[in-house]
Image (cartoon, grey):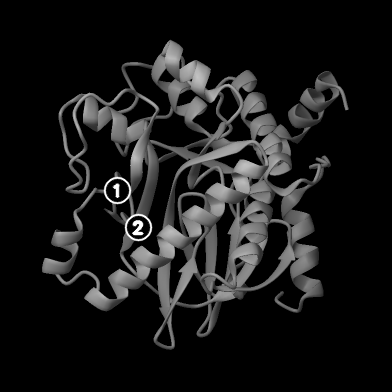
Amino acid sequence: MVSENLDEIIRKQFDKTLESTDFTSLGDFYKGKVRDNYIMDDFRIIIATDRLSAFDRVITTIPFKGQILNQISSFWFEKTKNIVKNHIISIPDPNVAVVHQCEMIPVEMIVRAYITGSAWRAYSKGEITSGVILPNGLRKNQKLADIILTPSTKAESGHDIYISKEEILKNKMVDRTVYSQMEEASIKLFKFGQDYCQKNGLILVDTKYEFGIKDGELLVADEIHTQDSSRFWISDGYEEKFERGDDPEILDKEIFRGWLMDTYPDVFPNIAPDQDIPPISPGIKIELAKRYMKSYQKVTGNAFKPEVSDVKERIINNLRKANYL
């Protein structure tokens, strides 16, 4: 498929993206930044919409994004289920995951192997992230001597707040034993992801994990190693670009954050919770959709075949077939 045809398919999907759902019969509704959750006693149905968030605001929708993210996350959950148990029960639709209902832990585990993104922005200002003191003289996008964990609180809205391990334990936000399990699980998952990505010509730069408790057992939940939760670089050429001071080739949505800051420097990155979202160009939306597809192909080894369709109607049909509607 030539790029012009792909661009046309993406454009045709602009008015068919999944912005929200309203399946009230499925259970109690909880709306996340990009996922709609329907909660029952023992399980929940998570629908990955096409909403795109940046700087803790939902900015726009991107064609095929929800499907790609759900399928990539499902891929990783299947690959890592023997390393760390996860919350998946079934995948009845490309945009839908049925999962165990967990008691979610209010701390996100952010794992980093390179100094970039928000950690770089803080470091360049002389600020410390999550109590982790890094050596002087690091350069943007430099590989760290070792993996670091920079946990943050899980915010309902607005910016998540970086917090140190010591503060988490002192304030009894997480039981000490459970936190140790979260640390161990995060490092195991990240190292597996790094090794797998490396074989496919990718660098897993950093990521976040969320955990929950089900029947006293720790489960990894939400999503893993997607473009929304992780940063990926193309490994080929990274070293040369770093030596020249150039940014690496990226597959994640950091390009969108950069576009927002370049296009609307008076708005981003410090957009207020109630501030109007400025117009988002079709060009950047097409570019993002193509990058999400490229990531899917690079990670899974399978070609993504976009089909112009009414996403919500397909979800309704598949949930009916699975006897949820």
The secondary element bearing badge 2 is classed as: strand
The residue at the far left in this view is 170
Q: Nearer the viewer, mark 1 or mark 2?
A: 2
User: In this orientation, which residue lies closer to the viewer: 198 or 321?
Assistant: 198
Q: Position of residue 143 (x, y in %)?
A: 39, 34
* Displayed quadrant of residue 71: bottom right
The residue at the far right in this view is 1
Q: Position of residue 35 (x, y in %)?
A: 53, 55
Q: Which residue is mark 2?
A: 108
Residue at left offset 43%, top offset 29%: 277
- Is there a contact, CB below 8 Å, between mark 1 and mark 2? yes
Q: Position of residue 76 (x, y in %)?
A: 62, 58
User: In this orientation, which residue lies closer to the viewer: 130 or 265?
Assistant: 130
The kind of residue tagged 1 is Asp
Q: Which residue is mark 1?
A: 160
Is 160 situated above or below 178?
above
- Within 10 Å of the Cα at label 2, are there few (<14), some (14-19), or many (20+) other Cα atoms? many
The secondary element bearing badge 1 is classed as: loop
Whether residue 78 is visible, yes or no, is yes
Is 36 situated above or below 117?
below
First-in-chain label (1 vs 2): 2
- Within 10 Å of the Cα at label 1, are there few (<14), some (14-19), or many (20+) other Cα atoms? some
Cα distance, mark 1 to mark 2? Answer: 9 Å
Using residue 69 as the reference point, say whether residue 206 is left or right of it: left
The kind of residue tagged 2 is Glu
